[in-house]
Image (spheres, coloured by chain):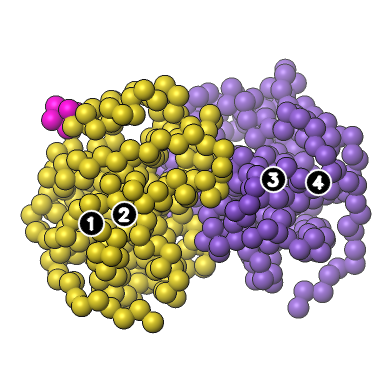
Chain colours: A purple, B yellow
């Protein structure tokens, strides 16, 4: 089916999901909206995240998308169920695919999660994991500095390493037992190498971005919504923030610049929801 | 939801899917039916495989299953679409999950597939891969000796190695380019180590069993059909063949014997299908 897939995030993190969607579903057209202006969502109260997410969803629905990928862990934690209940198109979040991949990967049932304050505070990953499998040791840690660091373009180097080392300190004593760590924020794959270096090679990092693209493919196919035409290149990108920083970061993700980037305003009065 | 998941296979191969379902979805109750009496399906004509598969499906529907996993590549190749069109419960096959995992895993877009004659002749994997991504080098090879070998319990040792080496000969010249090989038959994970040894460590083996369990989890959750009760141990196993061989092979898969194994007859007149 020839309609686009809509992807939303609080900023640029969801572009790692876009990158994987392009790789794993090259025939799909994507429309991305990053709410960079109001990023980060992590420290915001739940009602704000819910309202901002609906603002983004309404914007995408006007573009006639066939599916929505909530490529932001904080937004998934607070809104996925509500979106799935209210929308007639499939909605996929980033938490469940990461949880499922961790369960598939772990051999010793000891799983770690890092994410924003909002994601960790919501317990969404722990609930998603235990919903499926009770018998797991789980250590969760909020890393509030990672999103601002990435949004400023600090992705490697000594400063990045220092911040990561400092932030992950509380997990270090588990690093030889915990065999799987969920990168529970779509910004984190951008600093994956730094995280891997700090923790060592014995911990498998699970990218919620990769896994979400995989499950998007499964859900689309199950609903017979896959586009079977030619490979797509005319994706559209929208940001509520400044074009320059967005462009900068997309370059480091895609190794090329993107066309079709536009600045938009999406802030509205609260939307009626049936 | 407290109903069981039904799993069908031509013989014992689907038990590798069961093993992964137990590991990745420990709260789900499973009912397995292996049509050992009429195994292998691989060399049979399409209309026979279709009829035998419907025999198995009817048996499971009487057990009030909430979902059916077609844990046999040959049956998936010939019947998945028909089953999905006719049944009101979700049906998952083993081909699409393996294809999707290969697309996610490959870095150089060179993918191999091994399977039964029926699976390879049907082109089902090549179609599933190209449906999603056109730009792939694909080498497919039928290995007709693997299923009979596994059903006889020959899973390792010199004889197994000889058969595998001989069978994989046509793929050997690709083994340094092809970075992902789909084990396109649920029997093959039982001889995974032998295959890996013959091909070398540079080829990632994709188990359709592991990947199918993962997608079963995703589809169940998407349809809000996950069982959230306690972990299950009272699975039921049925075979149309001899109990002894079945018991023998389950031991080598589960490292323990199974309870609740019964012999059944499912052969019937062709079933009316709307």
> Split into 4 quadrants, where in the image is the C terminus of chain B?
bottom left
Per the rendered image, the range of residues in magenta is: B157-162
Provide the chain ID for the residue under circle 2.
B
Question: Does the magenta run of residues contain A271?
Answer: no
Q: For the point 53% across and 23% down, which residue is it?
A: A200
Q: Rounded to the nearest whole Å, what is the CA distance between mark 3 and mark 1?
A: 40 Å
Q: For the point 72% across and 19% down, which residue is it?
A: A157
Q: Position of residue B39 (x, y in %)?
A: 18, 56
Q: Residues within 10 Å of mark 3 (few under 14, many from 20)?
A: some
Q: Is circle 1 on the same chain as circle 4?
A: no
Which residue, given by chain and number where applicable, does mark 3 sit on?
A: A232
B123 versus B168 height, above or below: below
Q: Rounded to the nearest whole Å, what is the CA distance between mark 4 and mark 2?
A: 42 Å
Compare marks 3 and 4 and give the one earlier in the sequence. Answer: 3
* Dominant SS type (magenta): helix
Q: Residues within 10 Å of mark 4 (few under 14, many from 20)?
A: many
**Can residue B220 be seen in the rendering of this structure?**
yes
Which residue, given by chain and number where applicable, does mark 1 sit on?
A: B44
| Quarter of the figure with residue B147 | top left
Relative horizontal placement of residue B104, taking residue A191 as reference (left or right): left
Q: Is circle 3 on the same chain as circle 4?
A: yes
Q: Residues within 10 Å of mark 2 (few under 14, many from 20)?
A: many
| Residue that lies at the very extreme toward the top in this rendered image | A158
Q: Residues within 10 Å of mark 1 (few under 14, many from 20)?
A: some
């Amino acid at each position: 089916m020839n309609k686009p897939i809509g992807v939303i995030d609080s900023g640029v993190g969801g572009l790692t999901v876009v990158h994987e969607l392009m790789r794993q579903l090259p025939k799909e057209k994507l429309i991305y909206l990053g709410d960079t202006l109001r990023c980060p969502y992590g420290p915001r109260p739940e009602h704000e995240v819910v309202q901002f997410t609906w603002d983004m969803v309404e914007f995408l629905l006007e573009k006639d998308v066939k599916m929505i990928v909530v490529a932001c862990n904080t937004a998934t934690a607070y809104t996925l169920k509500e979106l799935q209940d209210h929308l007639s198109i499939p909605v996929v979040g980033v938490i469940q695919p990461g949880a499922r991949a961790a369960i598939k990967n772990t051999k010793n049932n000891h799983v770690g999660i890092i994410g924003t304050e909002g994601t960790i505070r919501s317990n969404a990953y722990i609930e998603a994991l235990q919903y499926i499998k009770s018998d797991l040791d789980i250590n969760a840690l909020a890393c509030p500095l990672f999103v601002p660091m990435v949004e400023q373009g600090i992705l490697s180097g000594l400063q990045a390493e220092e911040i990561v080392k400092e932030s992950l300190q509380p997990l270090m004593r588990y690093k030889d037992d915990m065999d799987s760590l969920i990168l529970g924020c779509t910004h984190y794959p951008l600093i994956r190498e730094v995280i891997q270096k700090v923790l060592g090679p014995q911990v498998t990092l699970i990218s919620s971005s990769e896994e979400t693209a995989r499950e998007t493919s499964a859900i689309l196919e199950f609903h017979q919504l896959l586009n079977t035409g030619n490979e797509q290149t005319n994706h559209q990108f929208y940001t509520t923030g400044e074009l320059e920083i967005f462009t900068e970061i997309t370059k480091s993700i895609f190794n090329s610049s993107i066309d079709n980037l536009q600045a938009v305003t999406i802030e509205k009065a609260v939307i009626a929801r049936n």
